[in-house]
Amino acid sequence: MSLKQQLVALQSMLIREYLRFIRIWVQTLLPPAITTVLYFIIFGELIGSQLADIGGYRYMDYIAPGLVLMSVITNAYANVVSSFYSSKFQRHIEELLVSPVSNFVILTGFVGGGVMRGLSVGLTVTAVTVFFAEIPLSHLALTLGVAVLTCILFSLAGFINGIYAKSFDDISIIPTFVLTPLTYLGGIFYSLDMLSPFWQQVSLFNPILHMIGLFRYGWMGIQEVDTVNSLLLIIAVIVMLTYVCLRLLKRGTGIRP
């Protein structure tokens, strides 16, 4: 296929992925907003009002960027894993694999859908956040960049989960037993400085901690992780996951008998 035809194929996949989640916005965009409101009421208002300021910000303001990025992570991952597994279950992924469309375009199409849903949910949750917390946006470019990179990383991770999933139950194992614990231990509700030196070092092995730290720095200017090293870590993981996804597609893992 020519480059123009590959771009047309990619555009078609992106439109399909966008329509897939926007048609059921009540199920995809509304629940994260409601969940965030509950977090702000319970953790921000009821519990946070009893806590001291962190970095010169109210507790409710401090947890705001983490809550936004948590929604981005969850939805970017969920969109790709469910979409790819559904394409396997309905057998139409085979049509893509036997077509002249390159594996990179196929991967980009699914990942693009995860990015669109992750950012859409992020914007929705941010709109809700306005009513509860301040949004200073100290470094807007960094904030947006981290959000996009986070969407890409977890979309790739969701793609791998979708490849290996053999039933609908399998697509919930990783989010439940891996993604959720890493997210809650990623510094959403607490500062890294609150931990002992030992647990601070252990926490640095959690990639989500670096994403939330970078996002919080871009959002409100509180620097808890090294900006350059954390960005390089995220980009390195994205490159690694992209390579793994392309290799799995080429081999037909979880798709071809």
Image (spheres, rainbow, N blue to C red):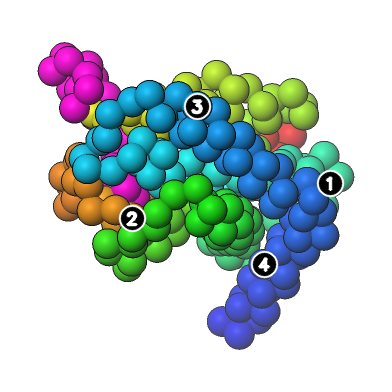
User: How packed is label 2: few (under 14 Cα within 10 Å), some, or many (20 or more)?
Assistant: many
Quick one: label 1 or label 4, which is nearer the N terminus?
4
Specify the segment rendered in magenta: 193-216
Which residue is labeled 3 in the image? 46
Which comes sooner in the sequence, label 3 or label 1? Answer: 3
User: Where 50 sits versus 19, above or below?
Assistant: above
Q: Earlier in the sequence, mark 1 or mark 2?
A: 1
Under circle 3, the secondary element is helix
Q: CA distance from mark 4 to mark 2?
A: 29 Å
Residue 22 visible within the image: yes
Residue 144 falls within the magenta-colored stretch: no
User: Mark 4 near mark 2, Cβ–Cβ under 8 Å?
Assistant: no
Task: Say which element carries label 4.
Answer: helix
Number of numbered callouts drawn: 4
Looking at the image, can residue 152 be seen?
Answer: no
The residue that mark 2 highlights is 219
User: Where is 96 relative to 82, above or below?
Assistant: below
